[in-house]
């Protein structure tokens, strides 16, 4: 004869038994991963010495706050613009044709050399400007500049 | 010419005309065939390469079989073209068109990469990205399957040309199971397509006419207050995060579980820091890959009804993130219902039993497995020694696996030496099996669910299909809505299928046999039977015809209440249909004439030639995930596995040799007989596996009284069920997600489930527990994995000869019979019927009305399932979402009866039958009429229907006549709070339309066809 019953007496597992069981699992894992654990301890010791561990600890515990502050800050125009510029700059660098730029820069440098040597007191009249065009070096520069201006103004 | 000559003349003329018609048909058929051959393939040139298309093939479908890439977002193989996203633009014969909107009917030349096509594709993608913000890294949908993400990445779109425009709508978080975020919605309309035409619940629409179109529920109410049945299919097909399971939100990603404000600023920053899509995808793809590390996706088989849906279940530790049906799921494809998609909370319920329990001093005490097993073995041994093996009984579970059914019967037969083994198919489907064995020889569905969908005419009898087998019902609903399938419903109650039916008939309870026989007689009397089929394939026609004499139209009209005219029309339509499938369920089987009525259905199918072909046949819809398999694998008192009789010497000797044990030859006791035998003092011990017999058997006062008389009672379950309360030992078992094995669905389809979670506490898989009991009793069973149990069973039962786990990996399945070489049988009887001469049998039947209401017990109680709950509710009531929508069982009362008795919604009543009484809350609805009541069976408290049912059974199978209850009503309270909360889907207001109505999108002023825009700009 069995009446319906609903009461369950749970078996209390003694604290010591749970402790023993857990300890066994942990020590097994330790033993199996000896090298990794030792290296890990070394790493922990290092970041503890230089204060990083405390900082990480505090940061992780306040992750949500920290993230909120960082996000708020990063979303301000000055930072977000920097971020946007950074990535735009990155794209820009990708578009530049470095070989040609190098050629152009070289020429630019030579021009700078020459300009440095002038004392800056001489005056150039219209006539001397036209005369100067006969100088093959100046003529080359002007031709190149005119071509550059044409290219720059071209509509796609 | 005299009369004779005229007759002769007419006969010759008729013969000539006949022959001409035949010749014409013959020629036409041959010409057709030739033409078809020519048409079989159409040459399509795609980007200069030649490909062969089937006539009528969708162009996008064809392109997807090649190496060419065309972006596509709204297109989904399971749904077909929706034509809303405009991304699959290609050039066909010089014109820009949607590939998904193009059908290949003649040779065409297609260019998918030409500039104009590319620009049109890009234009469409840009428009989509105006509607969908890409913040993938912090999106819960970033799991590698986001179709927007993947399409944009593969297309190589680098920049957003036009900025994302937020919409003015709030997200709809009102539902328990999923949420809608209009801001992320691209209005592709897949959700609408699936709701309207696949699930056919007709809740979702897109309101194209408002300034900012959006998806709306029931014409515009919150999700929670709509007619949504939470089947979850809209969520499954959503290409992005617009519709998402609430269980995924904040759980799936590493950086998604933050407060909304913080999440918003993270989204903003993500977009700033990742300006082009390239870097954004690089980071989000990495994050998606990281998710794989902690989210497991495991294929499993649903553990609710017999449709056998399969899907991936996503778990993170023990959390169930979501259930995702796959297009390759054999029975269901992308479909699911509320229980399979969202009803898994029971697995992590706090109420799970986690340690074996033994009854001691008026309570259950937790013990170690060693102690529990030793105790069970000792008591089994003692009772067997004292009273003999037949004093022990075993009940298997239709929830457990095939392998577990096999082991349970092996324990009974080999270890104990008794055939007292049965399962819950005794409560539902045994009569259908009986009817099919009598006529066609296999106790299962004739074909697959595809065949039901393919039939020209579907008749359902006593089946509340839309609630009991929702995914299967959707296939019928779809065929009827879109493909001209006819649906006739015979039922007492005007449930959803009845409301949709082309013909709905309400024969008087328990008289289905009469109209079936009368229609068969009428067909034969008219000479409309399929003569050729009968001659070739069917025996016993003459005796059968003779037995029909009694079933005249007059008699049928008198008994069933259906007018003769209607019956004759139905007969005519049955004969006119080339392919007829009949589905039936508990409304047929749970009667005293359940087996006979099932037989009558099969008889009708035989005389009309509706077997052996696709789209035809008999479909007894199985109610539980493995009610088919549990019987298949031998948990039956008269059958060994594979339906070989225990009295069959050859079969029994096979097992005797394998198991090295003499086996009992006489059939054992079924469930119901076991209860009688306990009362009679013959049966002393009972071992019940995963079955709440004390709630689900009929006349439970009688059943629980039997439990009290047992000497020893073992119950193996997840929970302390009503039945377990009577146990001496309770063994903690695990649910399907925590073990491996196979289930067999209603289509005879064997499917594998994989383990998704570890067992809770010290609970164990049933097969392990059964094995440990056998070994404790001195046997040496050594199964390391369920595959070894299946291998043993396959080697012994010819029906499963070729079943192997290797053939069942992932979404692969086998439909029995499976030949030794692994060939399975999606359609039965292709080469004849499994009888000596390959012919089916017509089985003569008689009829006497065995049940009626009386003057005192004047109301009829119909009973059955609700969509959202299952069986006695042990699993589904553990889901807070489901319980919120449907907190309790209720009693449906017709408006006329409510008037007559002066009661209103929420009234409390007591129903009393000759066996017992229940009390419950009234819901007034015209789903029931007159003096018929409906009581859902999903309650194990004071509204449990089986307090009312009695010991009457089907005369041939001993299945309780659950559906034959006459009661009287007592009013306890005249009105009160409705048992149906305002959030129940039955209160919704569905809006039927076909598809998403994309034409209304195209009519909008600002809409331009991307192709034309390109042309214009160019």
Image: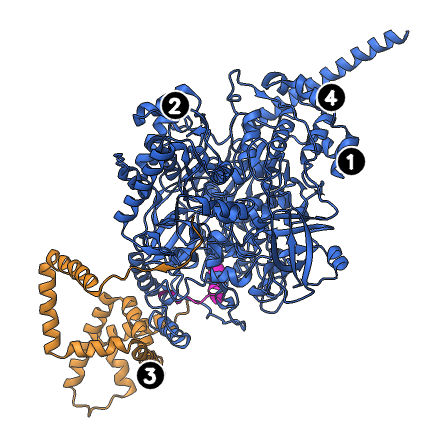
Chain colours: A orange, B blue
Distance Cα–Cα, label 3 vs label 2: 86 Å
Q: Does the magenta stretch include residue B777?
A: no
Q: Which residue is drawn at 42% across and 27% down?
A: B799
Mark yes or no: residue B749 visible: no
Q: Mark 2 lies on which chain?
A: B
Distance Cα–Cα, label 4 vs label 3: 91 Å
Q: Which chain carries label 4?
A: B
Identify the residue under disc 1. Answer: B558
Q: Which residue occupies the foreground of this view, B724 or B54? A: B724
User: Same subunit under labels 2 and 1?
Assistant: yes
Q: Which residue occupies the foreground of this view, B698 or A66? A: B698
Distance Cα–Cα, label 4 vs label 1: 24 Å
Left or right of A96 in this view: B987: right
Q: Give the range drawn in magenta.
A: B124-137
B764 relative to B223, above or below: above
Identify the residue under disc 2. Answer: B652
User: Same subunit under labels 4 and 3?
Assistant: no
Distance Cα–Cα, label 3 vs label 1: 89 Å
Callout in the foreground (3, 1): 1
Distance Cα–Cα, label 4 vs label 2: 46 Å
Element type at marker 3?
helix
Q: Please provide percent x and percent y for residue B39.
A: 55, 31
Q: Please provide percent x and percent y for residue B915.
A: 61, 47
Identify the residue under disc 4. Answer: B527
Query: What's the magenta bit mostly, secondary-structure-wise?
Result: helix
Q: Quadrant of residue B900?
A: bottom right
Q: In which quarter of the image is residue A122?
A: bottom left
Q: Quadrant of residue B896?
A: bottom right
């Amino acid at each position: 004869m069995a009446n319906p019953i609903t009461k369950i007496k749970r078996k209390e597992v003694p604290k010591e038994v749970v402790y023993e069981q857990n300890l066994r699992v942990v020590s097994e894992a330790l033993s199996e991963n000896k090298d990794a654990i030792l290296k890990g301890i070394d790493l922990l010791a290092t970041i503890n010495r230089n204060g990083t561990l405390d900082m990480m600890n505090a940061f992780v515990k306040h992750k949500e706050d920290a993230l909120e502050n960082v996000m708020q800050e990063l979303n301000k125009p000055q930072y977000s613009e920097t971020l946007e510029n950074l990535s735009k700059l990155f794209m820009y660098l990708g578009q530049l044709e470095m070989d040609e730029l190098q050629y152009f820069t070289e020429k630019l440098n030579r021009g700078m050399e020459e300009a440095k040597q002038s004392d800056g007191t001489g005056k150039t009249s219209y006539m001397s400007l036209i005369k100067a065009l006969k100088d093959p070096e100046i003529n080359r520069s002007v031709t190149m500049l005119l071509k550059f201006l044409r290219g720059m103004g071209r509509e796609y | 010419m005299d009369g004779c000559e005229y007759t002769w003349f007419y006969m010759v003329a008729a013969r000539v005309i006949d022959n001409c018609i035949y010749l014409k048909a013959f020629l036409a058929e041959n010409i057709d065939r030739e033409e078809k051959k020519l048409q079989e393939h159409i040459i399509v040139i795609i980007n200069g390469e030649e490909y062969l298309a089937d006539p009528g093939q969708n162009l996008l479908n064809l392109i997807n079989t090649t190496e060419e890439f065309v972006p596509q977002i709204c297109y989904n193989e399971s749904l077909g073209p929706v034509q809303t996203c405009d991304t699959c633009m290609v050039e066909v014969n010089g014109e820009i068109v949607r590939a998904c909107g193009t059908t290949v009917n003649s040779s065409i030349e297609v260019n998918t990469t030409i500039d104009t096509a590319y620009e049109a594709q890009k234009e469409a993608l840009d428009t989509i990205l105006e509607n969908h913000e890409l913040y993938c890294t912090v999106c819960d949908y970033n799991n590698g399957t986001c179709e927007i993400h993947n399409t944009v990445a593969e297309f190589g779109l680098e920049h957003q040309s036009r900025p994302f425009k937020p919409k003015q709508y709030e997200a709809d978080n009102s539902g328990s199971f999923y949420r809608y975020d209009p801001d992320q919605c691209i209005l592709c309309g897949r959700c609408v397509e699936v709701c309207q035409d696949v699930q056919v619940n007709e809740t979702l629409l897109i309101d194209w006419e408002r300034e900012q179109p959006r998806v709306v529920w029931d014409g515009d109410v919150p999700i929670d207050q709509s007619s949504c049945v939470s089947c979850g299919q809209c969520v499954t097909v959503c290409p992005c995060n617009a519709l998402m399971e609430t269980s995924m939100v904040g759980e799936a990603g590493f950086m998604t579980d933050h407060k909304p404000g913080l999440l918003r600023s993270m989204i903003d920053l993500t977009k700033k820091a990742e300006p082009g899509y390239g870097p954004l995808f690089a980071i989000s793809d990495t994050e998606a890959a990281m998710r794989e590390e902690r989210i497991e996706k495991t294929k499993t088989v649903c553990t609710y009804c017999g449709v056998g849906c399969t899907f991936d279940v996503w778990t993170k530790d023990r959390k169930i993130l979501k259930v995702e049906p796959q297009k390759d799921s054999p029975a269901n494809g992308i479909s699911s219902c509320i229980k399979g998609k969202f009803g898994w909370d029971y697995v992590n319920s706090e109420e799970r039993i986690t340690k074996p329990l033994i009854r001691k001093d008026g309570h259950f005490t937790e013990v170690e497995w060693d102690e529990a097993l030793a105790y069970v073995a000792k008591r089994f041994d003692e009772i067997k020694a004292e009273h003999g093996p037949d004093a022990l009984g075993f009940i298997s579970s239709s929830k457990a696996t095939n392998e577990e059914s096999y082991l349970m019967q092996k324990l009974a037969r080999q270890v104990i030496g008794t055939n007292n083994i049965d399962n819950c198919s005794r409560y539902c489907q045994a009569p259908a099996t009986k009817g099919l064995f009598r006529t066609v020889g296999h106790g299962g569905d004739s074909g697959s669910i595809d065949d039901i969908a393919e039939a020209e005419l579907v008749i359902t009898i006593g089946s509340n299909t839309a609630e009991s087998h929702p995914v299967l019902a959707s296939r019928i609903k779809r065929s009827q809505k879109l493909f001209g399938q006819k649906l006739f419903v015979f039922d007492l109650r005007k449930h959803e299928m009845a409301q949709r039916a082309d013909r709905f008939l309400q024969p008087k309870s328990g008289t289905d046999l009469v109209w079936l026989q009368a229609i068969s007689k009428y067909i034969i009397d008219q000479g409309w039977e399929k003569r050729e089929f009968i001659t070739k394939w069917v025996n016993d026609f003459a005796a059968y015809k003779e037995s029909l004499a009694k079933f005249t139209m007059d008699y049928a009209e008198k008994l069933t209440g259906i007018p003769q005219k209607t019956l004759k029309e139905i007969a005519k339509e049955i004969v006119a249909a080339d392919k007829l499938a009949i589905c039936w369920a508990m409304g047929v089987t749970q009667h005293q004439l359940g087996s006979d009525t099932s037989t009558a259905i099969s008889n009708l199918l035989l005389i009309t030639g509706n077997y052996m072909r696709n789209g035809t046949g008999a479909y007894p819809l199985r109610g539980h995930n493995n009610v088919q398999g549990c019987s298949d694998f031998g948990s039956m008192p008269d059958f060994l596995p594979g339906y070989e009789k225990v009295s069959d010497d050859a079969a029994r000797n096979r097992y005797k040799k394998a198991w090295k044990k003499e086996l009992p030859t006489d059939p054992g006791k079924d469930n119901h007989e076991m209860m009688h035998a306990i009362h009679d003092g013959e049966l002393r011990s009972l071992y019940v596996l995963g079955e709440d017999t004390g709630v689900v058997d009929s006349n439970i006062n009688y059943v629980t009284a039997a439990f009290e008389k047992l000497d020893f009672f073992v119950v193996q379950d997840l929970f302390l069920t009503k039945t377990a309360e009577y146990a001496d030992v309770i063994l903690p078992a695990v649910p399907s997600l925590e073990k491996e094995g196979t289930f067999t669905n209603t289509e005879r389809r064997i499917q594998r489930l994989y383990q998704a979670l570890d067992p809770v506490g010290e609970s164990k898989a049933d097969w392990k527990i059964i094995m440990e009991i056998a070994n404790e009793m001195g046997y040496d069973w050594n199964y390391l994995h369920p595959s070894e149990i299946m291998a043993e069973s396959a080697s012994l039962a010819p029906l499963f000869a070729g079943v192997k786990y290797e053939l069942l990996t992932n979404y692969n399945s086998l439909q029995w019979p499976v030949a030794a070489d692994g060939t399975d049988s999606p359609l039965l009887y292709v080469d004849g019927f499994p009888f000596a001469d390959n012919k089916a049998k017509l089985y003569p039947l008689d009829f006497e009305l065995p049940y009626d209401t009386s003057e005192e017990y004047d109301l009829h109680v119909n009973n059955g399932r609700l969509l959202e709950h299952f069986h006695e509710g042990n699993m589904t009531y553990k889901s807070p979402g489901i319980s919120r929508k449907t907190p309790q069982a209720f009693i449906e009362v017709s408006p006329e009866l409510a008037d007559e008795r002066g009661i209103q919604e929420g009234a409390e009543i007591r129903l009393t039958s000759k066996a017992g009484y229940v009390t419950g809350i009234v819901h007034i609805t015209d789903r029931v009429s007159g003096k018929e009541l409906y009581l859902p069976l999903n309650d194990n408290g004071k509204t449990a229907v089986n307090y009312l049912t009695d010991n009457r059974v089907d005369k041939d199978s001993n299945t309780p006549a659950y559906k034959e209850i006459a009661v009287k009503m007592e009013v306890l309270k005249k009105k009160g709070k409705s048992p149906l909360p305002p959030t129940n889907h039955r209160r919704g207001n569905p809006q039927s339309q076909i598809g998403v109505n994309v034409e209304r999108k195209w009519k909008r002023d600002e809409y331009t066809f991307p192709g034309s825009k390109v042309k214009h700009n160019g």
